[in-house]
Image (cartoon, rainbow, N blue to C red):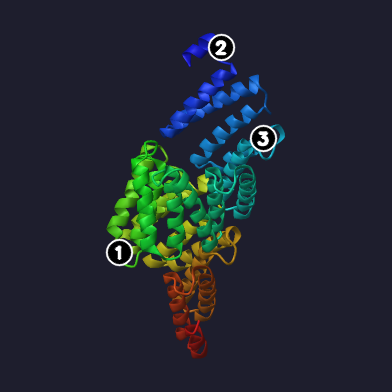
Amino acid sequence: RELQHVGLGDDHPSSAITLNSIGNVLKSQGKLDEAREHYEQALDIKVDTLGEYHPSTAISLCDKADLLKIQGNLKESLKIYEKAIAIDLTALGENHPHTVMTYENMAEVYDSLNLFDKAKDIYQKSLAIKVDVFGKDHVSTATSYSYVGDALRNQGNYEEARKMYDKTLKIQTSKLGENHPDVAITSNNIGLVLESQGSMAEAMTMYQRSLEIQRKAPDIGENHPETAITYNHIGDIYRNQDKPDLGEAMKTYRKAVEINRLVKKEDHPHTATTYSNIGLVLLHQQDKDKLEEALEMFEKALTIQQSSLGKDHADVGITLNHIGDVLKQRGNEGDLDKAMGMYQQSCDICLKEFGEDHPHTAICYGSIGDVLAAQGDYREAAKMHYKNLIVKSKKLGKDHPSTAVAHSKLGNALRNRGNLEDLEEATKH
């Protein structure tokens, strides 16, 4: 940097390239605020020397947007990607590799903002370009298969998502080897599909494979945000398996939180997810003394999510549902009404973000049904549990544990209502 300062001056485009490179190193080390300073300096130089609409300026815009995405500042990240894609399309054309990369980064932000249709459209456009340019078995094409899988999984289309991930994994293991970090990411994604389908043991195998790769990878290691995500997934299995191991779940979640603290990601949505998961462990212990601590965890998660994602984001809706669960279980005077308020807010958000036929929305139906049943309104409770059952049967399958719970709750509501004909019909479902 000093040599360039002497020979070329601080405002030469070569200085901007060096600043970008330093920013990349700092980002890989988790020093995100320092990386952002270098990216912004590089961007200022490029705008001054090359112009606002130069392809190299678009690269710096993408570097800054990517950093904001990592920090959880998704809406600002999206604005910058939109500037970059406008430059790429004009200067480079739609089929240029950098244009395709910018498309995919934009779509990833859309995905994180739960704008799944927009994300899927862009991912499919990117995939079509890559198949045309590189062929079906190229590593870059594999990445696009994975992105399409992400959009399908987030829409609750697990079977189709799994097909995309399997294509990705086949190419990656063949071209990159079984211990490449990209294989770890795809293993995590397959684990998420398996977990959603109730195949907990298979999901755990995929997560542990991912963790083993990440811990050995020179550029990742134990204390990296990607490793924290995998620990979080493993904690989910300990918590949700047939015989929950809440002690192991708590240890694993706390490890994820500690990693995020080390890399200065305490206010990131991923950290919020881990706080929420710790709250779920405390809630599932069914110990009234733990409920206030659980509530504190959910409220920490909610604060981060509302700040970084917005008040109408789906993750906010899910956390509101968890807070409702605490209030329902705590049972103080007025808590049941407060729980209903939380569940209704959650349902409104999930309906807007996911639609009527998504498993997350079904959870809201079931939660509202629980409160109605506790209030003695078995007729309305049965309606909500029926909606819950229909969605889960369709999206998760009739043999999924969550579908079985929905089935049981519908039966209880009908039994308490005294409607034996409907109960007999429900047991045939």
In this view, which residue lies farthest toward the bottom? 421
Which is nearer the eye, 285 or 115?
115
Where is residue 195 shown, x and y percent of the image? Answer: 42, 61
Of tags 2 and 1, which is closer to the observer? 2
In the rendered structure, which amino acid carries the disc numbered 3? Asp
According to the image, label 1 marks what residue? 287
Q: Say if mark 3 contacts mark 1, CB within 8 Å.
A: no
Secondary element under disc 2, as helix, strand or loop, is loop
In the rendered structure, which amino acid carries the disc numbered 1? Asp
- Total numbered badges shown on the rendered structure: 3
Instruction: Mark yes or no: residue 115 visible.
Output: yes
In this view, which residue lies farthest toward the right? 90
Cα separation between marks 3 and 2: 28 Å
In the rendered structure, which amino acid carries the disc numbered 2? Leu
Where is residue 177 shown, x and y percent of the image? Answer: 42, 44
In this view, which residue lies farthest toward the top? 6
On screen, residue 424 above or below 365: below
Secondary element under disc 1, as helix, strand or loop, is loop
According to the image, label 2 marks what residue? 8
Q: Residue at x 32, y 51 (%)?
A: 252
Residue 388, labelled with which disc? none
Q: Please report whichever mark, 3 or 2, sits nearer to the chain's N-terminal start.
A: 2
Where is residue 30 shown, x and y percent of the image? Answer: 42, 34
Residue 88, labelled with which disc? 3
CA neighbours of label 1 inside 10 A, class few (<14), some (14 to 19), many (20+): few
Image side of residue 13 versus residue 230, left or right: right
Q: Which of the 4 quarters of the picture holds residue 26?
A: top left
CA neighbours of label 3 inside 10 A, class few (<14), some (14 to 19), many (20+): many
